[in-house]
Amino acid sequence: MQHRSIFNSMLTAKNKVYLKLIPICCVLTACFAMLFGCADPSTPKQSEQTDTTATQKIKIGLSIESLRVERWPKDRDIFIAEAEKLGAEVIVQSADGDERRQNEQAENMITQGVDVLVVIPKDSVAAAQIVQAAHADGIKVIAYDRLIRESEPDLYISFDNEKVGYLQAEYLYRQKPKGNYFLLGGAPTDNNARLLRQGQMRALQPAIDSGDIRLVAEGKHWAVNWDARDALNKAEQVLTQTNNMVDAVVASNDGTAGGVIQALEGQNLAGKVLVSGQDAELAACQRIVKGTQTMTVYKPIHLIATKAAQAAVALAKDEKITEATQTVNNGKIDVPSILLTPIQVDKDNLEEVVIKDGFHTREAVYQE
Ligand code: BGC
């Protein structure tokens, strides 16, 4: 018995030693596993897999000049939906028409660690700073709809804006090959406004040279900030100066066309003077049906927004944008570009083009 009890107590002592060894073994095993795990990255643990995916989620910064014009919230929403579909996350900032604020917001998004910045610049020149700041942090930049000048953006995606301007003026010219024309441009800070003007002049120059078309109101040519109220004021001034002798107004977008048409209404001239536009805004489509606006230019927003989101994700992955087959010079470099095709719209093809594309409902346009 004595022998047995000594044996039992020896066993207990041994067990005690084993018990003390267990935690040490565990720690050693864990260290070994960790070392082994590091040496073989092909077999990460489940928790590591989740972490890697989380840190790899692409973050896109979308900097919008302002959301005041009808199209921009659509651009934003379609862009976000496509980016999220591709597994990316989008941070959106709107600068409410203030270029300094836009630059600050962009800086902020850079600090937040976005992988790509997509910029709709308020001021095509001031936004060059955004490109420089982003590039300093290795972040790629897409100029969305509006070119960023004097810098090196990685991609420019837009519609062919020179063509938009051409389509506006060409349409009015076909309706009225002789007469007094008032060209009302968009915001002078927006590179698109210049391109539109170039296209408008391409359509009208031969008739101006031959004297068939006379441009009225030198110096009243640009609507500050694309503002409809400024367009209204300028149109009123021009009507006063010319004693209402205006046959056509080449307005550069639908918002400013709205201002012009309000001024014409004040003189009982709405529907008698031709007015162009751009964007196929709902109010513009309704005016086309009513006959107070002559035409607009439709630019499928779903195309530009989805392509831009796809390009942003591709750039974040350092992939090449194969669709950027063109270049546009921005004063510094030839920027790789995707330029989509705009479509002339009047009352005859409104349904076929704008409504069929799902841009507006038939009920909304025809107010049925
Ligand atoms: C866009 C137009 C828009 C205008 C005012 C331009 O840069 O191309 O579609 O109407 O800005 O926001």
Image: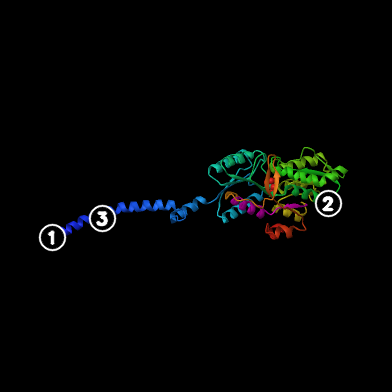
In terms of secondary structure, where does tag 1 sit?
Answer: helix
> Does 114 sit above or below residue 44?
above
Q: Which residues are magenta?
A: 294-314
Q: Is mark 1 within 8 Å of ligand 1?
A: no
In terms of secondary structure, where does tag 2 sit?
Answer: helix
* Residue 146 visible to an observer of this rendering: no
Query: What residue sits 61% from the left and 52% below the top?
Result: 309
Which label was assigned to residue 240?
none
- Identity, as a three-letter code, of the amino acid under mark 2: Arg
* Residue 35 visible to an observer of this rendering: yes
The quarter of the picture where residue 306 lies is bottom right
Image quarter where the C terminus lies is bottom right
Cα–Cα gap, marks 1 and 3: 23 Å
Q: Residue under label 3, please give it.
A: 18
Which label was assigned to residue 174?
2
Image quarter where the N terminus lies is bottom left
Q: Residue under label 1, please give it.
A: 3
